[in-house]
Amino acid sequence: MKNQLKHQLRVVKSSTSVLVKKMTSVDAATMTHANGDAKIAQSAKLVVKTPKGTRDHNPHQMSLRDPVFEKIKAIFKRFGAPCIDTPVFELKEILTGKYGEESKLIYDLEDQGGEKLSLRYDLTVPFARYLAMNKITNFKRYQISKVYRRDNPAMTRGRFREFYQCDFDIAGKYDTMIADSECVAIIASILKALGLPDFTIKINHRLILDGIFDVCGVPVDKFRTVCSSVDKLDKSPWEEVRKEITEQKGIAEEVADKIGKYVKLNGGKELIDELLENEELNRSTSGKQGLEEMKLLLQYCDFLNVSQNVVFDLSLARGLDYYTGVIYEAVLKATVVENGKNVGIGSVAGGGRYDNLVGMFDPKGKPVPCVGVSIGVERIFAYLEANAATKPRTTETQVLVCSAQKNLLEPKMKIVTELREADISAEILYKANPKILAQLQYGEENQIPLAIVIGNSEIENNVVKVKNIATREEEEIPRERLIEEIKERLKKI
Amino acid sequence: MKNQLKHQLRVVKSSTSVLVKKMTSVDAATMTHANGDAKIAQSAKLVVKTPKGTRDHNPHQMSLRDPVFEKIKAIFKRFGAPCIDTPVFELKEILTGKYGEESKLIYDLEDQGGEKLSLRYDLTVPFARYLAMNKITNFKRYQISKVYRRDNPAMTRGRFREFYQCDFDIAGKYDTMIADSECVAIIASILKALGLPDFTIKINHRLILDGIFDVCGVPVDKFRTVCSSVDKLDKSPWEEVRKEITEQKGIAEEVADKIGKYVKLNGGKELIDELLENEELNRSTSGKQGLEEMKLLLQYCDFLNVSQNVVFDLSLARGLDYYTGVIYEAVLKATVVENGKNVGIGSVAGGGRYDNLVGMFDPKGKPVPCVGVSIGVERIFAYLEANAATKPRTTETQVLVCSAQKNLLEPKMKIVTELREADISAEILYKANPKILAQLQYGEENQIPLAIVIGNSEIENNVVKVKNIATREEEEIPRERLIEEIKERLKKI
């Protein structure tokens, strides 16, 4: 019977040691995690592990993850979104040409005769494909699913090759910035609901960036590649980005320096007003339009009670090609300890406007303007796991049905069935004659609140004992009042 | 604004037409569905569709599916199971040699440098890999995830290339038949919870089948292949199976006829007793052991209150190689209409004991006995979709905040935020100045129960109007009592 108890313990231990590894050593994490958790079956020469960059989630991790998904779902619903689901793979050509330099990270399926398929890289392109395929022009939805990227895993910080995204998108031609502000508001609602109130949502606009590149003298055909370099400013200092722009991307030094002055700026409404007065930037039509839209967005953020978390940040560029308007990214102020140093968790949500993606799937190229946000939930889990004060229960069992003597499997099976039929979660041990101590120990290990104990005398007298496993208090109740009495006690616990 | 309303409608229509197709024409289903829902973007020559054998789920389908998953989850928890998650792909060699003839249906990933990967074919082999990798010898868990099979799609009956399985398994060395009976009981609980009380759970035992093959004169090395033929008895008459056994598998005609006598049998306890008296079958040790275990199982099924749904059926064989003991399969008595004919839905749950699978992943071959069940939820959906009387709502929005005049976006945004912060699901239309009729129409289409309507006079008088969208009743309430009043009204609805 002891064996039956061991698993939960083992899972607790292994999940603890994973956390310790995560928090103390990048090398250890790289060795064990980046290659998946590995145990080599030497005699059979079969390596028993999960694929590189992926992992299992044990019951303890699941009991942390599940409520987070539930909370995110609840907020998506609170903003009026229904849910859709799409296949894990798409026709390869659906994904082709949508991700710029990141395309090399797409997982392809083997050609086994038939269609060429790839695993989805995000939920945005499948959403756009769904809209175009069904000729939908107005739609709001959420989707919570796994996506796949052949990236270098950095599992300490929650970067995996298989990971969940939680997406909320609004498709349709609406009035300027209303849907965009809704996306910013939903990020704030979710982070607050998850108990992470200390965050900043950086906002920028691709048109403002284009305006800056324009007035600084970047050739139009280099806008996107310079934008990719600017995107690295959250991880690298300006000097490095400047070097990349001038040496790798062939931009003149004085042009780079002019860009440098702009992208260092961040602030609120006053910064927008200042830039709207800036004669240089105003020469660019797109720059001006971007600034005016940004001004409206900040006003709506104020109405939606999120302006205290929002900052207009000209260094924000976002990597993906398909954005066309407002872009945003939420950053937690919290840090995790890594090699004894505090390291920022970084971006936990991001998104923006992509007005041309759906049109790429339409025979006539008819565009459907879209704006959306994706919650990077794995990084949030990495933070929550590292900071979990107590271990949540992994099961919801309310009653353990125990026998104090031998040959009582029949009445135990009948009681456990009666309880379950009354919607009470109940278990018995899978032994014909387990020792009473082993049963109660199982109840304790699994934090089961109540035990029902029966012996021959209880059966004779038509009663059962109800035991509070934690306090060890015990009471006799009539057998026929079993369900009512148990329900009453469960209410009080 | 009308456009904003169209999507739900379109989704309703498209999901209806899918159902109609499903129920009326196999050919139509084969043409459109088996190739995924297709719209060809002709100018770009890009085929915008889902891959063969897969489909999207629109909000209406999701609102049918979601509660089903929730109910299944609740039952798994009621039996004391925690949850785990494993990656969608496994190392190819983990899956190799586990599925017998079905292996050819496994999806492989392209070799992009690195590990050779395959999409999971079921949740059982990954579970066994998880146990072996973590050296777990006692564990009960559930997992609800998608699996992948390059099968011929038959979408009318819910057979897809990407589909969900809901698995419950018990690993560990316990007393005979206790864990096995728990698996049978959980099938019954789930089908009852889903409102499908009319079902039969067929039960058999691999040792009984082996015993029959043995005493009938099948050579030991042909047990598994004859077993595969017998497995077809749920779809084909005995004459066809007999032909396969004799002509393709080279078994003598008199041997086949002897097998035929046995596999036609089904019944309850009395049949077991009869077979235990049967001198021929009793010559086989494994046959005898299988019968004795079956007798115990039927007794436990009685204690667990499921014997009325259980039948001992000697024709049940199950396709997969890894089963070693008890096997079972649940069949719904319900039918769906296909080409004007009533067709059975067939098996909606199945499983059995597999005592040697975990050992295949252990360096020393140490076995961990396991028994489990998989709920074939897609077939259940196919049935529920075909029989859904009303369309459930796709969103949970409780309040639509409307304006009766122009320039009221600011107070609307503030009210919608206040509602959401009080955990009330609320929406506004994404237009600066929508017409009041368009707003109320959106509320009606989406079955939103309440509308808050504000105009200039309401703002002046510090009140809001609350409207019941269905009954059109309207009341004025003080602005500062907004949340309490709305919550009170929502309770009543």
Image (cartoon, coloured by chain):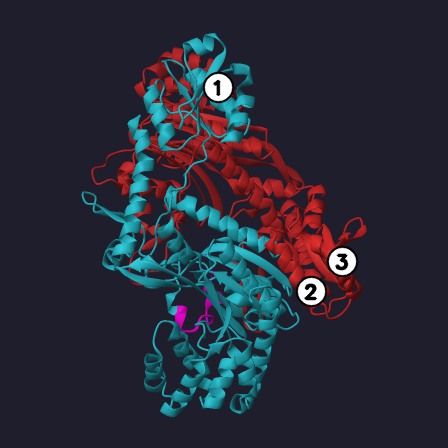
Chain colours: A red, B cyan
Q: Nearer the viewer, mark 1 or mark 2?
A: 2
Nearer the observer, B169 or A330: B169
Please report, as a chain letter, where disc 1 is located.
Answer: B
Nearer mark to the viewer, of 2 and 3: 3
Q: Pointer 2 indicates a residue of which chain?
A: A
Q: Secondary structure at mark 1?
A: helix
- Tell me which amino acid carries mark 2: Pro
Report the span colored magenta.
B90-103
Please provide percent x and percent y for residue B43: 18, 43
Observer-nearest of A207 and B414 = B414
Q: Is residue B170 magenta?
A: no
Query: Mark 1 highlights which residue?
Result: B414
In this rendering, the count of numbered labels is 3
| Residue occupied by mark 2 | A411
Give how far apart the Cα atoms at labels 2 and 3 are: 12 Å
Mark nearer the viewer, 1 or 3: 3
Residue B287's spot in the image, x, y percent?
A: 54, 84
What's the CA distance linking mark 1 and mark 2? 60 Å
**Badge 3: few (under 14), some or many (20 or more) residues near its Cα, within 10 Å?**
some
